[in-house]
Amino acid sequence: MIDAWMEGQRDFDKLPGISVAIVKDQDLIYKKGFGVTDLQKKTPTNSQTIYSICSISKLFTAIAIMKLWEEGKLRLDDSISALLPSYNLRQQYAESVPITIRSILTHSSGLPREAEYPYWSDDFKFPTAQQVAEKLGTQQTLYPASTYMQYSNLGITLLGEIISKVSGQPYEKYIEENILKPLRLADTKTHLPQELWGNRLATGYSALHRDGSRKAQPYFNAAGIPAAPGFSSTVEDLARFAAWQFRLLQKGGKEIIKA
């Protein structure tokens, strides 16, 4: 029934390919691929096909922040301006409380959704961390902090910079050594492996055009904002990631972070 339903979803939505894994507690009870990773190359998908996981990346950033908090290396109510000396985004509300790590984690910081670059356009040209920092001074808050929910890739990007500063390691290295390796997520990366593009790494496609087709999108690297949308993974790795959370909830204790 799952096979038939997934094939139906792929046909109805005109999706090139889908990979599926179902985890029950610690057991991977179903895994399968449907369709292809690239419409030209016709490489079949499977449970080890690598995809851009976009904003699932934010979960790994949040875990890293909570690990540093547990170790006493930062406080959730530390202000962003105290931790990042280069931060100079304009607060346009005099009554606002400080923008803190906590408000960024809960998307209530009042920060703009994005850095001041049009990277979600067709060319997907993402800025470097230095370019993001250089443009902060041209941006301003949208709301007073801790008032409204406003989803923000920029906020999570700044948390990535904080992780690097507080840990003394590049963001990518800290994530790999403290989360990905301990959880044995060998196919999860803080980037998209370009050498696998169109084969094991699925090609990205656009939304449906009026004629029912999808346009192939170019390879992209999130460059200076990997902490928000830049990771890649497989459904098997994400199933292990889910199993880790089930394990902590059931058994308590500490595994990377405390339950």
Image (spheres, helix red, strand yellow):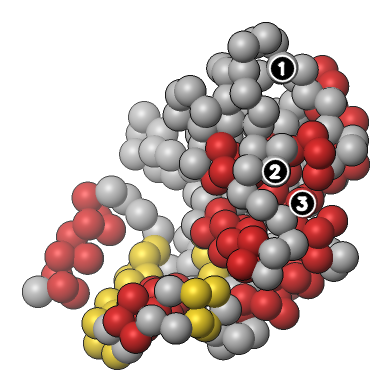
Task: Report the Cα–Cα distance between label 3 and label 1.
Answer: 19 Å
Q: At 48% across and 23% down in the image, what residue appears?
A: 147
| Res. 172 image quadrant | bottom right
Q: Earlier in the sequence, mark 3 or mark 1?
A: 1
Residue at image coords 78%, 24%: 89
- Mark 2 vs mark 1: which is more N-terminal? 2
Q: Which of the labelled discs sits on residue 91, or is there none?
A: 1
Image disc number at residue 162? 3
Earlier-in-chain disc, 2 versus 3: 2
Residue 153 screen position, x and y as percent: 61, 39
**Of 244 and 226, the residue lying toward us:** 244
Marking on residue 78? 2
**x, y percent for residue 250:** 30, 81
Q: Amino acid at mark 2?
A: Asp
Q: Which quadrant would residue 95 be assigned to in this image?
A: top right
Q: Do the CB atoms of the residues marked 2 and 1 lie less than 8 Å apart?
A: no
Q: Looking at numbered disc 3 in the image, what kind of residue is underneath it?
A: Ile
SS category of the residue bearing label 1: loop
Left or right? Give the position of 85 relative to 219: right
Q: Mark 2 or 1, which is nearer the eye?
A: 2
The amino acid at mark 1 is Gln
The image quadrant where one finds the C terminus is bottom left
- Toward the viewer: 170 or 65? 65
Taking the image as drawn, is residue 72 in sight?
Answer: yes
| Image spot of residue 227 (x, y percent) | 66, 54
* Dot 1 crowding, Cα within 10 Å, few <14, some 14–19, many 20+: many
Which image quadrant for residue 171? bottom right
